[in-house]
Structures are given as C-alpha cells and as structure tokens.
Image (cartoon, rainbow, N blue to C red):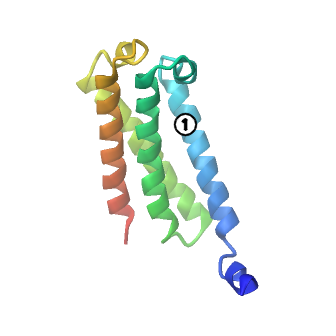
Amino acid sequence: MLASTLTGRPYFPGYLAVGVLVISAFLSVYLWLTPYHEIALIREGNTAAAASPSGTVFGVVRPLASAIAPSVTLIELALWASVTCLIQLLTYAGVKVLLPHLNEDIPHGRTASAIVLAAVSVGMGLLNAACLTP
C-alpha cells in the first residue's frame, strides 16, 4: 500500500523543492529590497516587522500552491511562481505609494502600516491564486 502511494506521487520531491526554492528566493529578494532589516527587528520583538513579511509570504505561498496542482512541468511551475513573486513585489510598491511613510513606520514598530501591507499582500495572493485555479 505504501509503495503504491509513493509511486503515485513521483513528482512530489521536485515540486516541493521548486516551491521551497521559490519561497526562499522571493523572501531573500523581498528582504533585500526593503530598506530596513526585518530579521534584526523581529529578533528585537518588533511586531510590525514580523507582520509585513508574514503577509507577503502568505501572498506568495497561496498562489504557488494553486499553481502546483495544474502544472504539468517544473518549468511551467517556475514560470507561474515567477509571476506570483512579481505580483507580490508590485503589491509592496503599491502599498508604499498608498502609505509613503511605510519604510519609516515598520522599523519604529507602527503596526497599523504593517497590518495594511500584510492584508493587501494576502488579498493579492488570494486573488492571484483564484486566477491560477483552473
């Protein structure tokens, strides 16, 4: 029974690896683009710094999960994952226009701005996921 279950999922390791790679690469780019150091701020207990990338990561993971199921190849998955990441980066840029002091608010622990960024990121991720669902 276990053998038949495992043979029915031969692509699992590849799709999981691509998913983890995409999330890691996206998070690295996102953390590099923001002018504050989220990891250091999070270690200091800054809730705003924790909320904003958390929403953004969910905004990438949800559509990535939707892209995995219908993808026929890992290349197709990587393509849609790239689109998902780009949408999240554009979402961050859009929220910065809406909240011009965002880059100051988060390091100062102002959670309202971080919550808006997280909520918009999650919302865009859900919309993106719906667009990817066949």
* Residue 99: percent from left, percent from top: 26, 22
Which secondary structure lies at badge 1?
Answer: helix
Q: Residues within 10 Å of mark 1 (few under 14, many from 20)?
A: some
Residue 120 vs 39, above or below: the answer is below
Looking at the rendered image, the quarter that the C terminus falls into is: bottom left
Q: Nearer the viewer, residue 15 or 44?
A: 44
- Is 66 on the left or on the right of 4, as rendered? left
* Residue 63: percent from left, percent from top: 43, 56
* Residue 74: percent from left, percent from top: 61, 64
* Amino acid at pointer 1: Leu
Q: Residue furthest left?
A: 98
- Is 60 on the left or on the right of 17, as rendered? left
Q: Residue furthest front?
A: 45
Residue drawn at the location 30% of the way across and 46% of the way down:
123
Residue drawn at the location 68% of the way across and 82% of the way down:
5
Residue 121 vs 105, above or below: the answer is below
* Residue 8: percent from left, percent from top: 66, 82
Quarter of the image for residue 29 reads: top right
Q: Residue furthest right?
A: 3
Residue drawn at the location 55% of the way across and 25% of the way down:
32
Residue drawn at the location 65% of the way across and 68% of the way down:
12
Looking at the rendered image, the quarter that the N terminus falls into is: bottom right
Q: Nearer the viewer, residue 74 or 117?
A: 117
Label count reads 1
Quarter of the image for residue 27 reads: top right
Q: Which residue is mark 1?
A: 27
Q: Nearer the viewer, residue 55 or 32?
A: 55
- Is 2 on the left or on the right of 95, as rendered? right
